[in-house]
Amino acid sequence: MKNFILVLFAVLCLLAVSCVFVVFEGQRGIVFQFSKIKRDGDSGEMRVYQPGLQFKIPLIESVKKIDARIQTLDEAPDRFVTAEKKDLMVDSFVKWKIVDFSTYYLRTSGSIDNARALLKQKVNNGLRTEFGTRTIKEIVSGDRSAIMAKALESAASSREDLGIEVIDVRIKAINLPSEVSNSIYDRMRA
């Protein structure tokens, strides 16, 4: 009899623990019911759980937590072509955060790598457009802030498309490609 009560107590404790989940500050939670996104009954919107202690039905519902903090997209430098058909290597970074979790999850499957790839493509398209309309002299002589502002404007559409708000776009460095730089240094040495 004692063993049965101990086993029953252990099962009830496991059941109680599996009913509760914690969404930490800087995260949001999405609950899945039988691998389908749980939606509100009235509006049909995806239910996104705010930070705190939350409850779920054990064995039926599972939780995926998404990072809600500001993220940094800092990839390797990319090659851009100017208006005079010269190549430049541009090193930039983007600060972004998720603002619409349901759109974000539907567009990226909740994968931060998918979000980074889509966001990089969108930001690079804006930068390519801006670099393509300027000469090297215009880019280097101080038009950098205007380029970053235009790239930020073009990335603003990611709010509706991906559920992501682009906070800042910055250009860290603008260099000539290594093969061009090496030939210039060789000519200088000669």
Image (spheres, grey):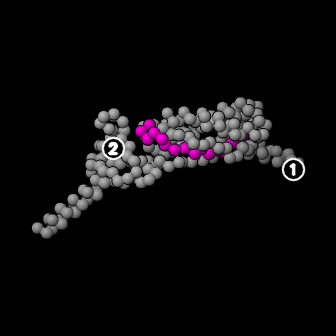
Magenta region, mostly helix, strand or loop?
A: strand
Residue at 54%, 48% (x, y): give it: 71
At which x and y percent is residue 56?
29, 49
Q: Is residue 96 magenta?
A: yes
Specify the farthest residue to the left.
1
Q: Quadrant of the N terminus?
A: bottom left
At which x and y percent is residue 156?
56, 35
Residue at 49%, 43% (x, y): give it: 98
At which x and y percent is residue 7?
18, 64
Q: Nearer the viewer, residue 27 or 83?
A: 27
* Span highlighted in magenta in the image: 88-104
Check disc 1 and give the amino acid type: Arg
Q: Are marks 1 and 2 in contact (CB under 8 Å)?
A: no
Image-quadrant location for residue 119: top right
- Examine the rendering and report whether any part of residue 117 can be seen: no
For mark 1, does the 10 Å Cα neighbourhood hold few (<14), some (14 to 19), or many (20 or more) residues?
few
For mark 2, does the 10 Å Cα neighbourhood hold few (<14), some (14 to 19), or many (20 or more) residues?
some
Mark 2, secondary structure of its residue? strand
Q: Sequence-wise, which precedes: disc 1 or disc 2?
A: 2
Q: Nearer the viewer, residue 68 or 14?
A: 68
Check disc 2 and give the amino acid type: Phe
Q: Which residue is mark 1?
A: 189
Residue at 60%, 33% (x, y): give it: 154
Q: Is residue 147 left or right of residue 161?
A: right
Specify the farthest residue to the right.
190
Q: Is residue 148 magenta?
A: no
Q: CA distance from mark 1 to mark 2?
A: 65 Å
Q: Is residue 8 left or right of residue 88?
A: left
Q: Which residue is mark 2?
A: 32
Specify the farthest residue to the bottom.
2
